[in-house]
Image (cartoon, rainbow, N blue to C red):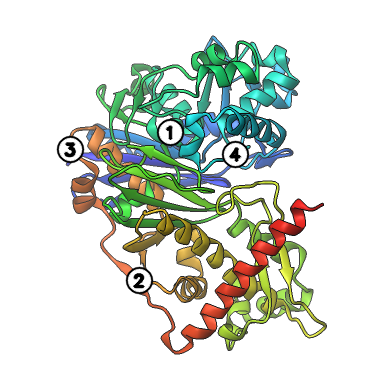
Amino acid sequence: MKTVIGIDYGTQSARALLLSAEDGRVLASYSSPYPHGILPGDLCSAEDYEDLLYILLRKVTPEEYRSTVAGICVDATSMTLVPVAADGEILGRKPEFANEPHAQIKLWKCHSAQAQAKEAEDLARKMNAAFIRRTGGRISSEWMLPKLLKIRDEAPEIYEKIDLAFDLCEFFTYRLTGEIHRGTGSMGFKANWSPEQGFPDRDFMEALRPGFADEYAYKLRGPVNTPGEKVGVLRKELSDKLGLPDNVAVATGVLDGFTSLVSLGALQEGDGAMILGTSSTLTLQFPEYREVPEVCGVAKDGLTKGLYGLDSGQCANGDLLAWFLENGLPGKITDEAKERGMNVHALLCEKMKEPWNCALTVVDWFNGSRNAPSDLSLTGSIHGMTLRTKPEDIYLAMLQGLACGMGENIAVCEECGVPVKRIVATGGITEKNPFMMQQYANILDRDIAVGNFPEGPALGAGIFAAVAAGIYPDALAGFEAMGVKKFTHYAPDQAHRAEYAAIRQRNHAARLMEVRRQKEK
């Protein structure tokens, strides 16, 4: 029997699975929160990320299986910037830079480069730069270009020390193999690169900052590989240390929102995959190039080789619900949940007797709007509260607001010729909150199939590892053997279809009003 390892680095924690390459059975697993958590400014500890990689590999490979490991793949949050010095060390681990924010790992949701993102976006529009049409006409502060530009502007001495700028998943393949490799996902969706055009136009980059074109290309150097492609083998130093074979294949690093689609089998034209966790992701596949305004973005081979992939979603999902429970929930609700031995989320859902009659409207931009519209400066809102409003009313409106946000993404895509034929879903929320998934089905007015597997991203990474090891010819064949087999199906509430349509319309109107109001400030 051959086995593979799938590793998933999320926002709050990381986990690893040892999987049978024959049928996807979980043979061992290990997960861990990051010891230091998220640091101020949405920065991350290099120790948390790098050292945990080796702990995960050691903990997930019991001695009896070590000789069977054939492949490894790591997925990670994106775009999480890892600045690496010429000696291969993360800058933040060097004593002289230990207290320098710009030398640390910048988490995907670090939005501090908003000024640089807007400057680059305005310039690209003014110059009619071709690359920006692939990103819905927008440049996000979450991406590589504005994050690097901010370091260049504010800490040139640190910027000069950055020899390699990695997305987190690319950094891990670098650590595992000792070789520099990039992925079509990180480069195509998060670094403004495409196989047809390469990096953004030189004239544009030089107009941003003299010398920036060559600097950007150098710091992001390396061959660009597709998901499931073998980029090398595990370094002998690591294989010896971990007791693993000498020829363990390492797959292209993949964005954490992109491995679930292979575990769910969402690999063909019209397949939509929702990954609902701290934030949310919607991926779509289609055969011909399409430009989708306000949706970031489109990349050839970005999700599946041979197809164009579209990456969209929202910046807050589980984060928004956690914020409400921590900051807006009265003690009587938490006390009742404790007395009844219930999860607070479950208690709030139990109290919602007629969710189709929700009088509140939530615009879910509490961490900015990633897509439809693409503007991270926008802020969220709650409309319609009165003295009769109860905590469960606000919670329900948040669930429906999140579903409406996903619906806005889908509507824009379909208007631009990107069909959504079916929707599958995974992520922590899909397992923990069935009421929320029913609201998604009701609001979207679509059937949703939720994969009955708690670690969809790590399973998908494992399937890519099996492809890289040559066990399967492609991701679809890997899914058929190893992927999720059981799904929970949610169908729309047909009896209250008109009421849910009214909620969608009211939410859409609130979004338009908020954009106008905030832009008039």
For label 2, count other residues whose C-alpha is less than 10 Å away and answer few (under 14), some (14-19) or many (20+).
some
Secondary element type, mark 2 = strand
Instruction: Tell how many labels.
Output: 4
| Contact flag, marks 4 and 2 (Cβ < 8 Å) | no
Secondary element type, mark 4 = loop
| Contact flag, marks 1 and 3 (Cβ < 8 Å) | no
C-alpha separation, residue under disc 4 versus residue under disc 2: 34 Å
Secondary element type, mark 1 = helix
C-alpha separation, residue under disc 1 versus residue under disc 3: 27 Å
Direction from residue 224 to residue 22 in the image, left or right: left
C-alpha separation, residue under disc 3 versus residue under disc 2: 29 Å
- Tag 3: amino acid: Ile
- Tag 2: amino acid: Thr
Occupied quadrant, residue 188: top left
Residue designated by label 3 = 471
C-alpha separation, residue under disc 4 versus residue under disc 3: 38 Å
Residue designated by label 2 = 488
For label 3, count other residues whose C-alpha is less than 10 Å away and answer few (under 14), some (14-19) or many (20+).
many
Residue 346 position in % (x across, y down):
57, 76
Q: Is residue 32 above or below residue 417?
A: above
| Contact flag, marks 4 and 3 (Cβ < 8 Å) | no
- Labelled disc at residue 188: 1
